[in-house]
Image (tube, rainbow, N blue to C red):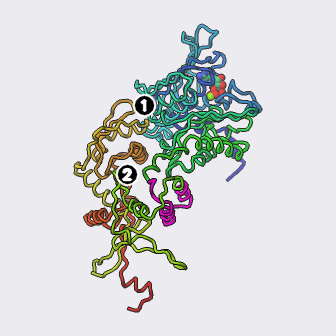
Amino acid sequence: MNRDNEKINKIKDYEKIAAGEVIERPANVVKELIENSIDAGAKEIRIIIKKAGKTLIQVIDDGKGIPPDDMELAFERYTSSKINSFDDLEKLSTLGFRGEALASISAVSQIEIISRIKKNERGLQLFIEGGKVLRKKEMSCPIGTNIKVKNLFYNIPARKKFLKKDYTELGHITDIIQRYSLAYPDFQFIYQHNELTILNCPASNDLKTTVFHIYGKNIAKFMEYIDYSEKGELFKIYGLVGQPQISKKDRTKSSFFLNRRYVISDIIFRAIKEAYKGTLMINKHPFFILFLELNPSSIDFNIHPKKLYIKFEREDYVYNRVYTIIRDFVEEKFMKQEPKYLDIELEDFIPKEELVEELSSKTQQSETENLETEKAILKTDAIVETEENIIDESVQLHLSEDIINHKPFKKQIPETFLREKFIKKEDFPKVRLISSTGQLSNKIYIVLEGFNETNEPGLYILDQHAASERINKEKLLESYKSSKTSKQKLISPLKIDVSHSEKFFLSDHLGEIKKLGFDFEHFGGNTFILRELPTIIGKVPDINVIKDIIADITKIGKDKSFSEVKEEIINYLACHKSIRGGDDLSLENIRDLIIELADCKDSYHCAHGRPTLRFLSFKELDKLFKRKV
Ligand code: ADP
Ligand code: MG
């Protein structure tokens, strides 16, 4: 190759390339436009979206407007009225500062903007396409800015093709708008999609009112105000902190605002989760809407083009402070009463020693979980000491169904009691007899005796969760195919509020979901009514369990057709409601489980392909023990 011929070229279409950093999808445009309106001092921001932002994103504000002479300049790269130089970044109080949003947006869309400042009678209108101003004219209009971003990526077909289905893109847009209405409860946000008003959040100075509008009453009433500030230095934390029972599976449901800018900060999420330690169920994240205010010079907002991630100057310091403040709050507000789920899982009258033994036998649990449970257990105060009582309590351990259903406690010594008490001898491991057919103490496996297909006698080990998962999967598949799901009608139907993406998913697939046994009806807005549940779910679960199911199946299915994800959803449901490892099973339950498993087409694998049953012949046992045979 002849290097002499190579020369440096100005890259054609560099604006389009650069725009990609800031604008990947309609929601990014919405974010930038809302930020500009906020910076312009608007009090009412109206957002009109068509076709999930793919054809139109319009933002109308009543802010200070753009002076006519600056209009064209505003669409050039690196132009901003907010900073002049790098040093200004340090004292920044506005949301925008890179001066590239409008330039980027206009490089990849068709723009129509009208803006008027107070001192002018009329406003100026501009038409811009692919970054070039096509026309401009003066016209009468209210003070403020009205910008239409049309046909996003009309000039980059490849990128357009990568946009997701409408309800996914709309979900992202809704998410952004919700975060900003939370950050600015004193602004009015009106948000419409294809003429339907999705959100109309009136200006109020009360964050709970905004939470009520966005998440509904059942979330708002479980949130507590926090307001912490320190004299002297700037370190303020305020907002709403959710009680443990409204914790979420997905941490991104919570919102964190740093100097009123919505950001994602791993450090903060970790500090807050840690502060909730001992109150949350495994895999749950606390739900909160928190604002942190710090001296802007200790934060670098400029590490990410979309300004979504940030860097703190003193990370450890911020982590520790946030942790301590939230921990104190959690201890004070949420730890004095027992969290609800503990009431169900651990009964007060179980004697301490028994429980500690139970604990140490839960080999499957991680150490931290053990610690958490242990703390919870040690808090149960009704510890009964007498010999007679201990017998009763050990009976209680096997009556978890009754505990959950709050049936009166039956006083009776079961025949298994003698078999299950530990034998304690000095210099000898603590052992106990297990029932000839029953669960091992970790409640994951069931030991059985039997013969294999070649009539060889031996030991069977059944994984109770895997087995029930298989049974449920086949029941669900069968009923899905035949449309004859065995269902249970709810005496009082449940009203459930869902998120936007969940709403789109549910309403698109009501029929298919009904075939699985969930009879949802759209009630209006973001609310659905649940009238029926598949019988495999057993007793009617807590509403939050239903919500989790909706969230999970939406996640599995949202960007695909239902037939593509049907099996995955069925596997998920089969797994969800199955008997878990760790559940107590009566001898009767075990018998039913075995009979149903035997009826399955594939008795030997769970929904995910793990084995359900394993065999060890007595011969193999003999080999293990080096017996001569
Ligand atoms: P930045 O927000 O980082 O300054 P932008 O490209 O988003 O950069 O906007 C460029 C400039 O256009 C802003 O600095 C501001 O002066 C002006 N501007 C943009 N949108 C509005 C609006 N809605 N109202 C008033 N001025 C605006
Ligand atoms: Mg901006």
Asked which quadrant contains residue 505, the reply is top left
The spot of residue 251 in percent (x, y) is 53, 44
* Position of the C terminus by quadrant: bottom left
Residue under pointer 1: 51
The spot of residue 286 in percent (x, y) is 53, 44
All told, the count of numbered labels is: 2
Foreground pick, 83 / 243: 243
User: Is ligand 2 within 8 Å of the beta carbon of the residue shown at mark 2?
Assistant: no
- Disc 2 marks a residue whose amino acid type is Ile
Mark 2 / mark 1, whichever is N-terminal:
1
The spot of residue 312 in percent (x, y) is 70, 42
Foreground pick, 404 / 39: 404
Say whether residue 348 is visible: yes
Residue under pointer 2: 404
- Disc 1 marks a residue whose amino acid type is Lys
Could you say whether the residue bearing mark 2 is in a helix, strand or loop? helix
Instruction: Specify the segment rendered in magenta.
Output: 346-375
Circle 2 packing at 10 Å, graded few (<14), some (14-19), many (20+), is: few
Q: Is residue 564 above or below residue 150?
A: below
In the image, what residue occupies the spot 50% across and 51% down? 283
Report the side of 460 relative to 36 (left or right).
Answer: left
Tell me if label 2 and label 1 are in contact, CB under 8 Å: no
Q: Image quadrant of ligand 2?
A: top right
Say whether residue 602 is visible: no
Report the side of 447 relative to 209 (left or right).
Answer: left
Report the side of 455 relative to 560 (left or right).
Answer: left
Foreground pick, 326 / 418: 418
In the image, what residue occupies the spot 45% across and 48% down? 341
What whole-number distance in Å separates the C-alpha atoms at marks 2 and 1? 47 Å
Magenta stretch mostly in which secondary structure? helix
The spot of residue 440 in percent (x, y) is 41, 69
